[in-house]
Amino acid sequence: MQINQFLILSAFLFCTGIYGVLARRNGVLVLMSVELMLNAVNINLVAFAAFNHSVSGQVFALFVITIAAAEVGVGLAIVLLIYRNLRSPDLDHVDQLKG
Amino acid sequence: MLDYAWIIAFIPAVSFVAILLLGRKFPRHGSEIGIAAVGASFVLACVAVVQWINRVENATGASAFKALGKGFVAKAGEHEAVVKPVVHSVTWWQSGGLKFGAGTQIDGLAVVLLFVVTLVSLLVHVYSTAYMHGDRRYTYFYAALSLFTASMLLLVIADNTLQLLVGWELVGLCSFMLIGHWWEEGANSNAALKAFFTTRTGDVGLMIGVIVTFFAAGQTFNIVSINEAALAGKGGHALWLGGAVCLLVGIIGKSGQFPLHTWLPDAMAGPTPVSALIHAATMVVAGVYLGARVYGVFWQGFSIDAGGVNAMALIGGVTIIIGALLAFVQDDIKKVLAYSTISQLGYMVMGLGVGAWTAAVFHLFTHAFFKALLFLGAGSISHSGSHHSFDMKRDMGGLRKYMPITFTTFMIGSAALAGLPPFAGFFSKDEIIATAGHFGYDAFLYIGLAGAFLTAAYMTRAIYYTFFGEFRGHGQPHESPPAITGPLVVLAAFSVFAGWLNATVVHVEKFQQWFEPRFAFPTQVIHPSFRFGEGAIAVIVALAGVGVAYAYYWRGVGHGVTERNPLARLGYRFLLNKYYLDDLYERVIVAGIKGPIARAAYWTNQNLIDAVINGVGKGTRAVGQFTYDVIDQRVVDGAVNGIAEASGETGGLLRYMQSGRVQWYAAILFFAVAVLSLALIVFS
């Protein structure tokens, strides 16, 4: 087993996530893409941990999973509010930050 | 307090600003600020006087009790102890290695003036609360009084002639402002202008004098240095003579000496408290103060110890007589007092001129009290007795029954002015006359005596018209309120007792011991002891004046002499027209300047100066046009516009960063992370 295989898989997932965050208009799909990116990071952490015979990477992965769960909770609440206010989950309409 | 004397002058200056800015919001419209400030200055001035006396006593080793009762000779040894003035100076500005200082020089003369100025100013402030009550520029009036007090104190504490000049001009300005206080009437603003211009004429002399003494003393404005250099005769006698003459011209202008005295009677157009403060007690004595301040210059320049005749004594002597004579033909009580002030200032200047430094300053001291008293008394009469009129013949008479306090205090002031013992004026005037006799100025001895006769006579005349006979005005005269009579009583007390500070008749010479300078001062100044013969003559002469006037006005002896005798009529008309001096100034000098000289100046102006100016103007215009077209429009504006356009375009590009779209921000974020990661890989 080579570590490269895991890294390539992780990079692929990360790029998919980036694409989803930047290209998708639906807020829910953007959130899911963020989850993809986080899981790509998890794969990296676990892979390096196994490769280096250390558990600390796996502990970090556990933390990331926990925080990802919390982040999805908050993120979905935000998307829900956006939907209620704008009658649409479309993130292109969320441009109030314009200066 | 001697080291921090600037505070005394600083407090009224602060009060001036405070009254001007906040005065109207106060319940008494700012007068309380002025009174509080001048009151504080007065207390500090008293502290300064006491400290100075202590300093002198400690230096001479004589207690106040020991010195009492000793004769002049016994104290001669003590006078050798040198008491230096307290001088503090800071550099105000510097120009090419020349330092111009601002500072304080506190010595006997300064503390006397500090006391007089703050006391009279305080009383006038209190008096004005009643006298100026309801005036349309009440707050402004108090602001001007404060400014005047501050300026006068600045002048008094000056340690250099330049600062003295600044104070001198400031009091002149305040005098102008206050004479013209009721400027709605043309006569008042004309009087203000006349006062300002006439004193300015003298100021030209003062300025030249300051410059001359500056160079004569080796490029210093410091008063002590100037006095020392003058007494040492540095640079030759002629130089100091020139300086003394120029300074004398300044004194003539400011202190109402012949021939520039004509502004002072007109200055009576101002409110009466102003006349009392500025044109009797303080500002007009600034000239005398200057003479006393740089006495070394006059001593050296006029060779005062030589006796005979000199310009200073002559001017003073002439002024005594002409002022006193003019007082006889005035109907306006304030004008009588104004001419009397001129005459008394003549005594002071003559006193300085004949070497009677102490007597002159002492006369300044006592005169401030009784002349302020007389002016304030006249104000009290007009305020409550004669319906704001000062005309003795039409609106006064018989007032002694209605205004007992004013009458009593006025009588005390008149007795002091006439030089009747034991009132203040007797001692000071007699000492001037006596010194004139002792120094070989015999002519001035007689002038002084003649002046005393005239003074007593014209004051008797004024009292006759004001207080005796039947009341000729209309309405019901009554006594003035306490704010007016209070200051009168205080000043009357000083008029009675101030003279005893230097009563040579009983060998009390505290004034001389405490306040005469011992440093940078002519050592040959002598202080004649009292002689009963001379004193008796002076008193008899004064009583004779009273008697003659009494005979003429009460008994009617010699009435109608001006109608019967052509010579007397001529003299009367001559006096009535004020020696035609005003005509000389206005018709000959001013008209001369206005007429041909002004026309010649106009022609020169139009044809010569304007040609040059037009040429210069055209040249300037061409240069300006060129500058506008090329430099301004192209270079400067180009640069400015270029910068603006560059900013605009950069902004236009950056606009896209701020779209407000979250995903666009995320894209930028990721791009930045990618670039930073790349950098990390490449550089690590």
Image (cartoon, coloured by chain):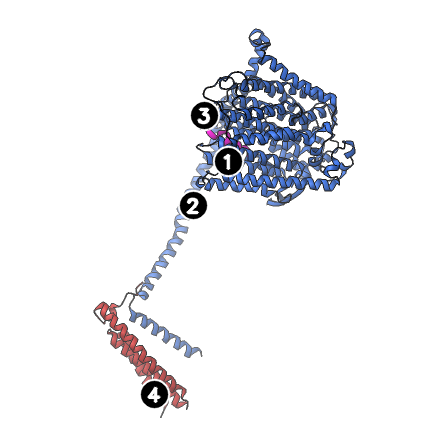
In the image, which lettered chain appears red? A
In the picture of the structure, the residue carrying the numbered disc 3 is B186
Contact check, label 4 and label 2, Cβ < 8 Å: no
Q: Name the dominant secondary structure of the magenta segment.
A: helix
What's the amino acid at mark 2? Answer: Thr
Q: Any magenta on residue B72?
A: no
CA–CA distance in space, label 1 to label 4: 94 Å
- Determine crowd level at label 3: few under 14, some 14-19, many 20+ residues with C-alpha closer than 10 A: few
**Disc 2 is attached to a residue of which chain?**
B
Q: Is residue B507 visible?
A: yes
Task: Tell me the blue chain.
Answer: B
Which three-letter amino acid code belongs to the residue tagged 1?
Ala
Which callout, 4 or 2, points to the residue nearer the camera? 4
What is the residue that sits farthest to the top in this orientation? B564
Tag 4: Cα neighbours inside 10 Å, few (<14), some, or many (≥20)?
A: some
Contact between labelled residues 3 and 2, with CB atoms less than 8 Å apart: no
Asked if labels 1 and 3 touch by Cβ distance under 8 angstroms, the answer is no
Q: Nearer the viewer, residue B163 or B427?
A: B427
The chain letter for the residue carrying disc 4 is A
Q: Nearer the viewer, mark 2 or mark 3?
A: 3
Q: Quadrant of residue B560?
A: top right
Which residue bears the numbered disc 1?
A: B144
Q: Chain of mark 1?
A: B
Discs 3, 1: same chain: yes
Q: Using the image, determine if residue B248 lies above or below residue A16.
A: above
User: Where is residue B493 shown, x and y percent of the image?
Assistant: 61, 30
Q: Chain of mark 3?
A: B
Q: Position of residue B116 (x, y in %)?
A: 61, 34
